[in-house]
Image (cartoon, rainbow, N blue to C red):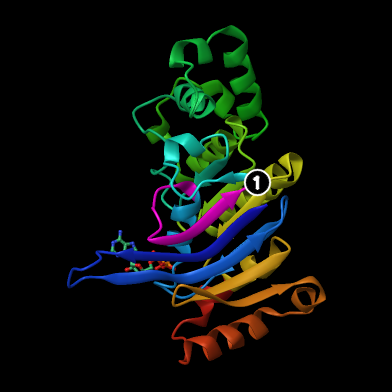
């Protein structure tokens, strides 16, 4: 279970640029559930994921993952607990390193093992097998640099990387937003498979209301750094994209200029 209590994040405290990104946010997520997270620009979605990953230290509040209080734990010491895939396919993996070196890094995340043992013999074969499961032909390019891959190929490899450290929590930060529709669909199918095969507790930030309802079992909307909508069960099953957009509009208190962006 993930438990977030009274979480506050203030950036640039005491400066003219001070910004409260999270304002006492409370959220409890059951182990193995898949929650989609929506909200307008600046609502605090990425900041929430940053706090869960350890990249952002909260100003106050408490974060527990399983039985571990991770509130003050830095990112490195959460490897093995939390994995994250970013919107930018260039983030989260190392471009100049090969596919297999990136996998080895992900495998050793947070552990004392070095790159060399992680890449020896059986391990190399295991990495190749995992990449072959993607059916993208990348198993024949294990020594190619990551930055030679397309955005979609990188996101696919990033999802495999996210599963290698044994993390039980997967954070997806608009991870299909930079992809063309066909590739986005492929990455979402892969995401579904990875999440259900490994029973991962998943938070997926998306700007697409369609994605928010089509995937996962619960949808949370953030606004002003707080949870303003939380739908699950039959309420969510019966909800249409148009209903969600109407709620989104109501909460924002303004008309959206580009509904297509949200429906897509
Ligand atoms: N490192 C930072 N320094 C200062 N302000 C920040 C920082 N990161 C985020 N913010 C501010 O905090 C608020 C919340 O940002 P956040 O990125 O969490 O929103 P978001 O919901 O993910 O938005 P988007 O959909 O645009 O990515 C915004 O006003 C943003 O400008």
Coordinates of residue 213 in the picture (x, y in percent): 68, 69
Residue nearer the viewer, 127 or 106: 106
Vertical comparison of 31 with 121: above or below: below
Tell me, yes or no, whether the highlighted magenta stretch contains residue 64: yes
Q: Secondary structure at mark 1?
A: loop
Name which quarter of the figure residue 20 lies in: bottom left
Residue nearer the viewer, 215 or 131: 215
Return the residue found at the far left: 16
In the picture provided, is 129 more to the left or to the right than 58?
A: right
Name which quarter of the figure residue 145 lies in: top left
Where in the image, quadrant-wise, is ligand 1 located?
bottom left
Q: Is residue 185 visible?
A: no
Q: Residue at x 45, y 22 (%)?
A: 101
Residue nearer the viewer, 117 or 17: 17
Q: Residue at x 42, y 24 (%)?
A: 98
Tell me, yes or no, whether the highlighted magenta stretch contains residue 164: no
Q: Residues within 10 Å of mark 1 (few under 14, many from 20)?
A: some
Residue range of the region highlighted in magenta in the rendering: 53-65
| Residue wearing tag 1 | 66
Return the residue found at the far top: 121
Vertical comparison of 48 with 68: above or below: below
In the picture provided, is 168 more to the left or to the right than 47?
A: right
Coordinates of residue 155 in the picture (x, y in percent): 51, 43
Coordinates of residue 64 in the picture (x, y in percent): 58, 51
In the picture provided, is 103 more to the left or to the right than 134?
A: left
Q: Is residue 79 visible?
A: yes
């Amino acid at each position: 279970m993930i438990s977030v209590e009274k979480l506050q994040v203030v950036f640039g405290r005491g400066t003219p640029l001070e910004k409260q990104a999270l304002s006492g946010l409370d959220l409890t997520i059951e182990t193995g559930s898949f929650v989609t997270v929506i909200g307008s620009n600046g609502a605090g979605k990425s900041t929430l994921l940053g706090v869960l990953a350890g990249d952002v230290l909260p100003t106050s509040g408490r974060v527990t993952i399983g039985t571990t209080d991770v509130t003050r734990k830095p990112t490195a010491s959460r490897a093995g607990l939390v994995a994250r895939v970013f919107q930018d396919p260039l983030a989260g993996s190392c471009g100049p390193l090969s596919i297999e070196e990136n996998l080895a890094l992900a495998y050793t995340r947070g552990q004392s093992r070095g790159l060399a043992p992680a890449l020896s013999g059986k391990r190399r074969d295991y990495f190749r097998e995992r990449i072959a499961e993607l059916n993208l032909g990348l198993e024949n390019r294990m020594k190619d640099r990551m930055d030679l891959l397309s955005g979609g190929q990188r996101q696919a490899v990033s999802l495999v990387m996210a599963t290698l450290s044994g993390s039980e929590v997967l954070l997806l930060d608009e991870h299909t937003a930079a992809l063309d529709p066909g590739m986005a669909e492929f990455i979402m199918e892969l995401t579904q498979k990875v999440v259900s095969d490994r029973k991962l507790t998943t938070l997926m930030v998306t700007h697409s209301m369609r994605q928010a309802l089509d995937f996962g079992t619960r949808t949370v909307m953030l606004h002003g750094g707080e949870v303003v909508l939380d739908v699950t069960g039959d309420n969510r099953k019966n909800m249409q994209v148009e209903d969600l957009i109407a709620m989104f509009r109501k909460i924002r208190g303004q008309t959206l200029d580009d509904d297509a962006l949200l429906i897509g």
